[in-house]
Every structure is written in structure tokens, then in C-alpha cells.
Amino acid sequence: MNWMKSVLISVLLLWNGSLLATDYFPPPFTALYKLYINSIPVGKGSRSLTKVNPNKWVFETVGETTGLAALIQAIRIEERSVFTRINGKIRPLEYTYRQTGRKPRHNQVSFNWSKNIAQDVYQGETKMVSLKENVLDRLLYQLVLMQELQQGKRQLQYQVINKGNMSTYTPTLLGKETIKTGIGELETLKYERLSANKKRRTTLWCASPLQYLPVRVEHVEKENEVFSLVLESVQGLP
């Protein structure tokens, strides 16, 4: 009986160890989207996660008008986060935002973790922001959101450096919704995040079959202007 007890304990230890070792971080992927303004197709977008080396990753999104829409109003928005991972947690190193065309904007945040300070340059104005653990940038929180939903979390909150200030992002779960995409219908969790002044709204539909990749992203700044990206194809995610 003692040998059976020893085998059982060993099996349980291996089982528990495998659970603890589970890494919910998504693999490198590339997702392509169609861009809409007020439900009218006007361009394209992409979202990608790339492993540069064992200690450095890049998370990047691009959205731009194409075709006739680009002739009428050329807009291109690029967001890029360079980060590392420490004990399974994401730590930002550098964030860049560029918007060209209508209302050109530029924002760059450099994270100095040895001094626990971030330098945030927005539209030529520089601010220094004190850092604390688990702080993210304006793009990277969406990758952490994927990771945490995969872990089973549903109540979400993030500390984010936003234009020289520390902001609290609290995406609210609105329920489940089936979304039509370029790869078929997908079951999603729908999250909404309001800006501090409640004038801007970002909604994410995160698909469980794709490790909670946002397969639809909608941003509203004005009631009569709704920007949305809908997934067309994806590589690298099961």
C-alpha cells in the first residue's frame, strides 16, 4: 500500500506542477482586419505579436484608409509596444503611437525600470511618470487582457500610462455575443471601456476559440463617428 501511496503523491505533484507551469501567453500571430467608418468599409488593419529574441517581444497594430476613402481622406494609425516578460508577467519597454493624415498625432513612452520612471512625450511635450509594478501602455493592456481572459479572469482592471498621466482602465463585461467575421461566426466576450470623461468608448469582442483575440474593435469619439475593425483572417492562433 505504501508504494501505491507514493505513486499517487507523485502523480498529483506532476499534475499540480503542470497546472502551475501553464503559460497562457499567446504565441506569435498575425491578424488582418477590415476597417469601417459608420459601417462603410474604408480600409484595412492588422494586429501582430512577434518574438524578437528570448527576452523581447513586439505587439503592433496598424489601421489605414485605402482606395477611394484614402483619396478623400488618408488616415494611418500605427501603435507599437516593445516589451519583455518577467515571471510570466508583461513589462513594457517602449510605446509608440503615430497618426498621419487627419489630426496628426505622436506619442512615445520610454520605460526605465531601473529608475522606476517613464518618459512620456506627447505632441512635443515631455512628462515624467513614476512607475510601479504591472503598469502598462495604451496598447499593451489589450494583450494582457487576452492573457487574463484565457486564465479565466472576467473582472479586469489595468493601470495605464496615458498622455503623461496614470489612468485606470476598467473594461466592463457586457456579456457573450456571436460575431460574424471573415473566418466565420465566433463566440465572444464583449467588453466596453469608457474614457474618464465618458465621451469616448472602446468596445472589444474577444473570441475564446482564438485565445480571446479581439475579433472586432469599435471606437466611438463622437455619436456620429464610429470606427470599427472586423477580423478577416488570422495566422498563428489555433
Image (cartoon, rainbow, N blue to C red):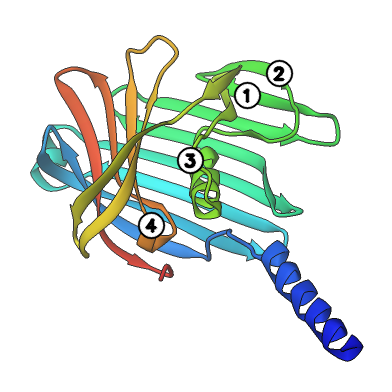
SS type, badge 2: strand
The amino acid sitting under disc 2 is Met
Q: Which image quadrant for residue 18?
A: bottom right
Marks 2 and 1, how far apart in space? 6 Å
The amino acid sitting under disc 1 is Asp
> Residue shown at 67%/66% (left/top)?
19
The image position of residue 204, as x and y in percent, is: 34, 39
Residue lying farthest to the front in this orientation: 1
> Residue shown at 65%/41% (left/top)?
92
Q: Nearer the viewer, mark 2 or mark 4?
A: 4
The image position of residue 173, as x and y in percent, is: 38, 34
SS type, badge 4: helix
- Specify whether 200 is left or right of 118: left
Quadrant occupied by the C terminus = bottom left
Which residue is nearer to you in this view: 80 or 235? 235
Circle 3/circle 1 CB separation < 8 Å: no
Mark 4 lies on residue? 208
Which residue is nearer to you in this view: 49 or 124? 49
Mark 2 lies on residue? 128
Mark found first going from the N terminus, 2 or 3: 2
Q: Nearer the viewer, mark 4 or mark 3?
A: 3
> Residue shown at 71%/34% (left/top)?
111
Does 41 appear above or below 199? Answer: below
Does 40 appear above or below 121? Answer: below
Q: Which mark is residue 120?
A: 1
CA neighbours of label 1 inside 10 A, class few (<14), some (14 to 19), many (20+): many
Mark 3 lies on residue? 154
Marks 4 and 3, how far apart in space? 12 Å
The image position of residue 49, as x and y in percent, is: 50, 58
Marks 2 and 4, how far apart in space? 38 Å
